[in-house]
Image: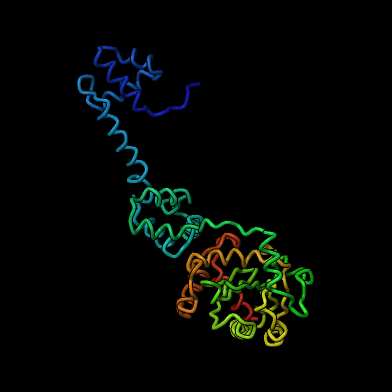
Amino acid sequence: MPESYVRLTNIDREEISRGLASGESMTAIAGRIGRSTSTISQEVSKNGGISGYRANLATRRAQRKAASRKFGRRKLTQNPALLAEVISGLMNRWSPNQIAKTLRSTYPGRQDMHLSPETIYQYIYVLPRGSLKAELIKGLRQERKYRRKRKTKMSKATEMRGKIADMLSIEERPAEVAERTVPGHWEGDLIMGKYKQSAMGTLVERTTRYTIMVPLKAKDAVSVRKAYVKAMRTLPKEFTKSLTYDQGKEMSDHKKFTVATGMKVYFAHPGSPWERGTNENTNGLIRQYFPKGTDFRTVSTKEIKRVQRQLNGRPRAAIGYRKPDEIIQQLVALKAGD
């Protein structure tokens, strides 16, 4: 069985050039460098023939051809409509995987509008440096480290947080919460701003991944409770069943929150962010827009809600590449029709 083809190297081309100059036949050159005679013949005929072959010129031509294969002839550069869809998705912070899945569902019978996530990654990284490349890279999923349980930080955090009165443990949650069978169960957290002097609340529905980003005037318990109550009152009652939160002191007013919304608050164990995994993952996505060091006192409510709309308009892998806002709208319409 013949070995798989390996492209000629610069050293191979030097040997071909020397062999031709000394009068060797192509068969002899091929045997000496371990290539087929047809490979040598094609290489020579494409690069000036026996009398005109030069190794350096042949190498430069091969490099230009390789660059053309990598960029100029790619499916994306030959299809302006497909390229426009990809760039639009990246500008909206969609990942290549989300873009590829959405294109397949949007154009089910159009092979010309289908591509792999890897094709998108390759397109971005072969672009020359510049503003377009920098802007498109922002759309790629952030390379953030997963949060891990760290004994020193956990003990310090536990010491600073203290105990919240009358907490309901996450272990007391109904089974339907863990199974994600019924919408209306939320996870919440704060994203801290620069020097922890400001914050923004994040609330994520576990079944649909619908996200509410809550502007905060302050991060004390009363301010957070009032802001969360206001956010929850924008939703139909059927979608406000429970909230799972960590043991941050901003939720020490949880009993008043429950009275105002009817939502029971369940508290995760200290130092266990995986118990609110949906919220943790969503906070990572939000950090694409508001990186660490953001002072939320300088971010307008209009900007926060713009990002919220964009985030909820993203196809999400966890829900079959559907969009959270589409799912929540469908559920609201179904409830209204009951």
Against 255, residue 175 (above or below) is above
Q: Please give left or right for residue 201 compared with residue 16 in the image.
A: right
Percent of width and height locating residue 168:
77, 75
At x 45%, y 52%, the residue is 114
Depth check: 164 or 162 in front? Answer: 162
Asked if residue 236 shows in the view, the reply is no
Q: Please give left or right for residue 243 compared with residue 70 in the image.
A: right
Percent of width and height locating residue 325:
54, 72
Against 254, residue 60 (above or below) is above
Percent of width and height locating residue 232:
62, 82
Asked if residue 3 shows in the view, the reply is yes
At x 59%, y 78%, the residue is 333
Q: Quadrant of residue 16?
A: top left
Q: Please give left or right for residue 269 compared with residue 11 in the image.
A: right
Percent of width and height locating residue 205:
63, 72
Q: Please give left or right for residue 80 compared with residue 233 in the image.
A: left
Depth check: 276 or 123 in front? Answer: 276
